[in-house]
Amino acid sequence: MTRPVQFNEKVKVVDIPEGYSGEGFYATSFDKAIGLARKNSIWPLPFATSCCGIEFMATMAATYDIARFGSERMGFTPRQCDLLMVMGTISKKMAPVLRQVYIQMAEPRWVMAVGACASSGGIFDTYSVLQGIDQVIPVDVYVPGCPPRPEGIIDGFMRIQDLVHNESLRRRHSDKYKELMNSYGIQ
Ligand code: SF4
């Protein structure tokens, strides 16, 4: 049985400001054009160690379908990915591995801590569990929950998209960013 095609007719298209368009041209800034392309083609690297990873699998699957955001291409090679999604409990033994994966990712790269364990160690306040991945790598977005539902993961993902869209192309060369990396001992 074929599905009927439905169009969203409620979408409002805003007029282009005066002086910014004409026959054959549309003016914008380079930052915005690159940001738009990057935000809609994020390639995630899922670093899933426990139960939150299962929620991520649901987020990838047909019902929630992260492909709608241009991110259906999961990568397990750090050099081809730009979003590290950490889902699950990270033990202190695992921390150097996570850090190594982050270091192997090319700039620009972003990090999302999915769930209580990745964000803060969660309920595992023990000698062996890292109390938040921000102890070893910088984090851009934290998603709360134990586990967060796919809606929560998608919300976090959209916040990453906002960051990607609005980030200046010069941010990675700024003193502030270098200072952040130095504070983690990353060159
Ligand atoms: S936050 Fe909860 S659901 Fe997620 S990995 Fe930790 S214990 Fe599991």
Image (cartoon, rainbow, N blue to C red):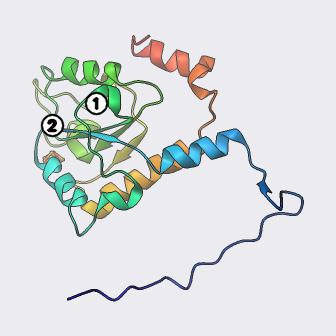
Q: Position of residue 183 (x, y in %)?
A: 44, 15
Q: Is residue 1 above or below residue 79?
A: below
15 left or right, relative to 93: right
Residue nearer the viewer, 105 or 80: 80
Please give the name of the residue rendered at 26% of the width and 44% of the height, measured from the top-left corner: 74
Please give the name of the residue rendered at 52% of the width and 43% of the height, measured from the top-left corner: 164
Q: Quadrant of residue 167?
A: top right
Q: Which mark is residue 38?
A: none
Amino acid type, callout 2 = Thr
Q: Position of residue 59 (x, y in %)?
A: 24, 59
Q: Which residue is mark 1?
A: 133
Q: Residue furthest front?
A: 24
Q: Quadrant of the C terminus?
A: top left
Q: Which residue is mark 2?
A: 89
Please give the name of the residue rendered at 78% of the width and 51% of the height, measured from the top-left corner: 27
Q: Quick check: can you spot residue 146?
A: no
- Callout 1: few (<14), some (14-19), or many (20+) C-alpha neighbours within 10 Å? many
Residue nearer the viewer, 60 or 129: 60
Q: Is residue 95 above or below residue 16?
A: above
Q: Quick check: can you spot residue 153?
A: yes
Q: Position of residue 137 (x, y in %)?
A: 35, 24
Q: Quadrant of the N terminus?
A: bottom left
98 left or right, relative to 83: left
Q: Are marks 1 and 2 in contact (CB under 8 Å)?
A: no
Q: Is mark 2 within 8 Å of ligand 1?
A: yes
